[in-house]
Each structure stands twice: as C-alpha cells, then as structure tokens.
Amino acid sequence: MFQQSMALWIGQYGYPAIFLLLVGGIVGLPVPDQLLLVVSGYLVLTKSLAIGPTLLAAILGSVVGITASYALGRSSASYISKMRIAANRLENARHWFERFGGWTLVFGYFIPGIRNLIGFTSGMMKLKIRYFAPYAYAGAVVSSLSCICAGYFLGTQAAWMLASIGRLALIMVAAGSFFFIRRAMRNGAPETVKATASATAISGILD
C-alpha cells in the first residue's frame, strides 16, 4: 500500500519529488529512501519516468543529502558529543573507520539504519572533507544505480531483494568484525601498541 502511494506521488510530481525526498530521507526525515529509489526504477520500467533524469535526480539528491547530514553533524559536534550516547556512537564509528576505512562510507548506504547516520556521524567525527567526499559521493552513485536498476529489472520483487541484501550486509559486517578481533587476540599484541596504531591510522583522516 505504501509502495503504491509513493509511486503515485512520484508519478505526479516527478523528478523534483525524487530529489527532495532523498535529501530529506538522508538528513533524517522518515522517508524510506531505498524503497523510493526502487519505486523510481519501476516507474522507469513502466515508462512513467525517463532513465536519465531519474538517475540524475537520485544521485544529486543522495549527494546533497549526505553533504547536508555531514554539515549538520560537524556543526553540532561540540554540543552533541557531550551526551553519553553520542560519545559511545562516535567511539563505535572510530572503530568502523579503523577497520574498514573509507569503504564504510561507500557500503554504509546499503545497510538499514546505517545509511541515515554515516553522514551525520562523519561530521561529528570531524572527518576531513577531502577524505569524506570521494567515498561518500561514490557511495551515493553506486547505491542510486543499484536501487534504480533493481527496481527496473526486478520490478515488484526488488524491495524484497534489497531487504535481503541489507540483512546479508549486516551478517558480513558482524563476521568481519569477529575475524579482526579474533586475529588481534591471536597475535597477542600489547594493548598500548594496538592503541597507538589505531590512533595513528585515524588521526590522518580527522581534522
């Protein structure tokens, strides 16, 4: 039902609706942006939208949304970081970047719950813009192409497929984290050495 309503809304207002909804969804409004892209791809399949403008609206919306989210996180970092829950989240984000680097920004788009936080959290971490932008914008392009193509080629089955991919990504992330932790424990490196290495790795990408 919700998918049909979204399709009617996009069909009525067209490409500006795709752009604005994506910006709002990534910034934090309750918009299912991945489903939005899938529906857009399906509308391309039914000839209600054209592929070129749809991709352009999707990519620009994702880029503007992730940039606005980053700017909000950066401007509010000094205030929000004083909160206990925010401090814990920042520490978790540091661990993600230490283990997976910029790929966190690229593939975070595909993980439910992470997609809407990566820009804001990166801003709160004061991640350097020259490090943030290439990976975050590449992720915007990859996710937009993937979701729209899924809607185009798979039609009504695309939403189910993307949900399955999201669950698979979470499993892979958990497995990867377990692997790194287990390897570190086997190596038996002193905590001070590991802490110094982590600090060195992350300091190069933070202001």
Image (cartoon, rainbow, N blue to C red):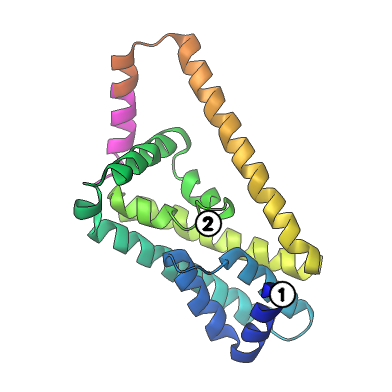
Hey, what amino acid is under mark 2?
Gly
Question: Is residue 66 located in the magenta-colored stretch of the structure?
Answer: no
Look at the numbered disc 1 and give the secondary structure of its residue.
loop
Residue 124 sits above or below residue 201 on the image: below
Look at the numbered disc 2 and give the secondary structure of its residue.
helix
Residue closer to the observer: 142 or 17 = 17
Res. 128 visible in picture: no
Mark 2 surroundings within 10 Å by alpha-carbon count, few (fewer than 14), some (14 through 19), many (20 or more): many
- Give left or right: position of 121 versus 147: left
Mark 1 surroundings within 10 Å by alpha-carbon count, few (fewer than 14), some (14 through 19), many (20 or more): few
Write the residue at 67% across / 43% down.
168
Question: Is residue 201 located in the magenta-colored stretch of the structure?
Answer: yes
Write the residue at 72% across / 75% down.
1
Residue closer to the observer: 61 or 6 = 6
| Picture disc at residue 1 | 1
Q: Which x, y percent locates residue 145?
A: 64, 64
Residue 148 sits above or below residue 182 on the image: below
Quadrant of the rendered image containing residue 190 = top left
Label whose residue precedes the other's in the sequence (2 or 1): 1
Residue closer to the observer: 203 or 87 = 87
- Give left or right: position of 63 versus 34: left
Write the residue at 73% across / 86% down.
48
Q: Residue tagged by mark 2? A: 139
Q: Which x, y percent locates residue 133?
A: 40, 57
Write the start and end of the magenta stretch as one range.
196-207
